[in-house]
Amino acid sequence: MTESDVQKVLARFQDPETGRNVVQLQQIHGLTLEGGKLAVTLGLTTWAAPLWEETREELTALLQKEFPGLDVSVKLIEHFRPAMPQGQMALQVKSVIAVGAGKGGVGKSSIAAYLAIGLARAGAKVGLMDADLYGPSIPHLLGIREQPYMAYNKIQPIEKAGVKVLSMGMLVPPGEAVIWRGPMLHSALTQFLQDTEWGNLDYLVIDLPPGTGDVAISLSQLLPPSGAVVVCTPQDVALLDATKAIAMFRKVNIPVLGMVENMSFFLCSNCGARHDIFGTGGARRRAGEMGVPFLGEVPLETRLRVLADEGRIAAAFDDATARPCLEAICRTLVRGMADDRRKKPVQPTLPLL
């Protein structure tokens, strides 16, 4: 067995971001084979950060299967691949994820914040834009009291929990209502996208207003998202509205990446018993009926409510019950997006930058 034999096996392994083989993309940064030991250094992008560990396990298993008896070790390092300009706004972002809901009160903004924070914690470069212009709650959830400032003719977003954040809630006085018609909403959304220094992002998470109004339509025209995440609670009335949200996204040609069931169950802090206050499994069943991936469920916990009220929602990832649920949702979301990329026809290799 030679290094050439190993390279042939590596050429069958796909990069999770592009779906193309890692040898073709020059992502093998090191390979040594001596004394019955094989060491491979694989470069992965920060877009794929939530999948780094399982990608390492997949490659290790492949090499052990092909070369039984070898002591295989796989080291991961960052492989930089710049984002390409997206949509009319020419944002440098690889994936735009819209988070929506058919109705208010289901915790949509909390889920948007959890997704952005979870992706950032995994190692991705993330922005969070609060497009819920009528009821912006992202600043409160994250405890942001600073106002964005202008520099080099660009709005500078506020960074919190490793995420670049911009919201109308940072720009209007507390308690003041935003009373705008469709054209003004479109203009504000354009400014948030075009005139903000987002930098080079892996993900831009956009918290949409509830319902099926103008903002989602404007977004589909300005910056076609990679897809949408629909948030609902388990009871039937919420699922009916979530169905409408899915239909709306499909009408404006925004793929639905999956559904998240929020307030899915309550764990008693005294006895540990699980209580399905709003029913159970509703979102999973509806997702299956509509051919939409089910991303996971988030528990109803007093601690999570307190953290949100106190502007410390990022600390939810320190909660022993919530953290596995939130991290699993992020992984499932990115894994689904990666699988979709792998299914697309392989494009000719472009010169590396």
Image: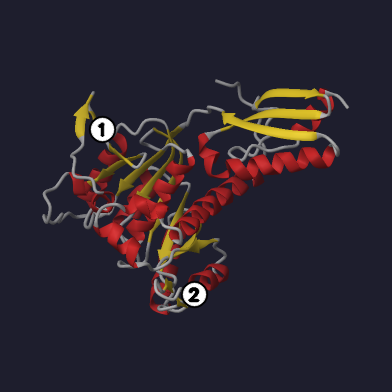
Give left or right: position of 336 versus 312.
right
Alpha carbon separation for disc pair 1 and 2 = 41 Å
Residue 344 falls in which quadrant of the image?
top right
Q: Secondary structure at mark 1?
A: strand
- Give the image location of residue 289, x and y in percent: 56, 71
**Vertical placement of residue 4 versus 172, above or below:** above
- Give the image location of residue 34, x and y in percent: 81, 23
Q: Which residue is mark 2?
A: 282
Amino acid type of the residue tagged 1 in the rendering: Gln
Q: Can residue 178 be seen by looking at this rendering?
A: yes
- Give the image location of residue 64, x and y in percent: 80, 40
**Vertical placement of residue 238 versus 66, above or below:** below
Residue 87 falls in which quadrant of the image?
top left
Of the image marks 1 and 2, the number of the one nearer the N terminus: 1
Q: Which residue is mark 1?
A: 156
Which residue is at the front of the view, 17 or 146?
146
Give left or right: position of 235 versus 191.
right
Q: Quadrant of the C terminus?
A: top right
